Amino acid sequence: MPKGSKRKPVKAKSTVKNRSQWKNAAWEGRFTEAVDPDVAAFTSSFLFDRCLYPYDIEGSIAHTEGLVRAGLLTPAERKRLVEGLEEIRAEMSKETGLEAHQNRAPLDEDIHMHVERRLLEKVGEVGGKLHTGRSRNDQVALDLRLYLRTEIGQIVEQIVALQKNLVFQAEEHLETVVPGYTHLQRAQPISLAHTFLAYYEMMERDRTRLLDGLKRLNQMPLGAGALAGNSFSIDRSHVARLLDFPQVTANSLDTVCDRDFVAEFLSSASILMMHLSRWAEDWILWASTEFDFIDLPDRYCTGSSMMPQKKNPDLLELIRGKTGRVYGALLTLLTVLKGLPLSYNRDLQEDKEPLFNTVTTLRSGLRIMTSLTKEARFNDTNMKAATEEGSLLATDLADYLVEKGLPFRQAHRVSGKIVRKALDEGKPFEGWTLDAFKAFSPLFKQDLFDRLTLVGSIEKKGGIGGTSKKSIRIQIRKIKRKWNH
């Protein structure tokens, strides 16, 4: 470059073709120039938060009642506003994603401004009264709570449907014996029903965890304004009753920046996905040739583009893989929240995409596992054969000696020596004579052989939470009584 010359600053090229459209923002009064089109595109959330439209309209209709009670709207004005909002709701319910994009004004920053713009087009200036006494800050807090309250209710229903299929399979497989594992090593024989009820208990903790979160979520934020409350004596409690909230939020400053309820949901969702992932991993192993415990229906599997013989449990693998996506959503939100000063900051716009994606992922995973649980078939013969190898009754030997008066540590040592000799000789101890056992302890009697069976081992575990048929039937009865109440 020649000496003394100056480099001209380079202006980035906009990706927005029609600049003339980007004007008339709702907050333009304080500004002297139109927003840059790339900035408008970058900050707009409409294409993903439009799914909140039913809740935005529901909250707006309730808000009109609050405005009437505060003397800020006449009944006639409220009627016009509600009719306009209902028309918008009907229109948006019919729109596809593409139509939503085409019908959208370029500077609809979000679903709230989109609804307001269309309302003004329908009812005229009276539409401008709707935003009296509220901010988008408390408005979006309301929409998210309404949305998540509905979704949690539907997710809980899906969990219950899945639990019912687990109980159905448990009842079908009370007699089916399968190895129980620790460290992925065969440990003790259990009934297959016991594994189904193990998954049931995981799902039950997930269900109650989500319902517990509803207690903190189910508070009405509207009326908090931008951060300091509103100046119009709007009866927040009345609006809360209209929207079926048992209480209102207590502090306006906290209200508009609170996303604890979203973080708590994402945490509960992460634990639920972790449970589904562990379960999927079990069945991926069971479907392998090495285990061959389960036969997954063909329509829930895929093949190989190269190897014709393959039958891959891809859906289970994707449930396992998508768990990371849900974990990422939780970490994303916690990272957004960790450095925010009071009160509202635009960073909070980043709460929605992780939340919406998590809801979609969670519900599809639950739907798949519900169907798969009902239709999966199990190879009882292979499961039983697997329990007959690997000295799975060794603990029963030790327990028998304890019942005869030997301290458990000594009984454990005796049982271990028996296992070692059986391994050295290549002959399972289940086939030994009584004299062979007596060589290790005189406490062994003829009644030992009643214990050294798969059924005898399982039925001995008759306490609460055990694997015996009696214990499992008691558990199932308790579950069904809970459903009936």
Image (spheres, rainbow, N blue to C red):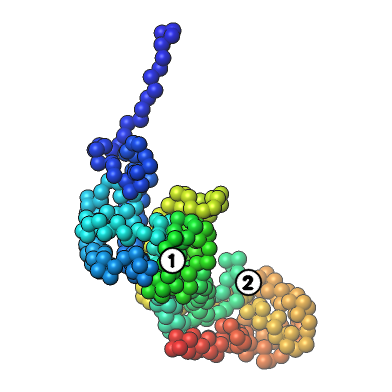
Q: Position of residue 305 (x, y in %)?
A: 32, 53
The residue that mark 2 highlights is 426
In percent of the image, x 34 and y 52: which residue is there?
110
Q: How many marks do you count on the picture?
A: 2
Closer to the chain start, of discs 2 and 1, is 1
* Disc 1 crowd, CA 10 A, few/some/many (<14, 14-19, 20+): some
Residue 292 position in % (x across, y down): 45, 69
Q: In this orientation, which residue lies closer to the viewer: 474 or 290?
A: 474
Q: Nearer the viewer, residue 117 or 188?
A: 117
Q: Quadrant of the C terminus?
A: bottom left
Outermost residue toward the front in this view: 71
Residue at 35%, 36% in the rendered image:
32
User: Which quarter shows the N terminus?
Assistant: top left
Query: CB of mark 2 within 8 Å of CB of mark 1?
Result: no
Residue type for callout 2:
Gly
Q: Residue at x 63, y 71 (%)?
A: 426
Q: Horizontally, is 481 left or right of 407 in the view?
A: left
Which residue is at the far top?
3
Task: Give the residue number, with chain letter if any, for mark 1.
Answer: 233
* Residue 435, image x, y percentages: 72, 86
| Whole-percent x, y for residue 278 in the image | 50, 66
Image position of 74 with respect to 429: above or below: above
Vertical position of residue 317 compared to residue 450: above or below: above
Query: Nearest the camera: 84 or 446?
Result: 84
Give me the disc on residue 2: none
Q: Amino acid at mark 1?
A: Ser
The front one of 311 and 267 is 267
* SS at badge 2: loop
Which residue is depicted at the point 78% across and 84% down?
A: 406
Q: Is residue 131 visible?
A: yes
Q: Looking at this rendering, what residue extends furthest in the bottom direction? A: 447
Q: Which quadrant holds residue 322?
A: bottom left
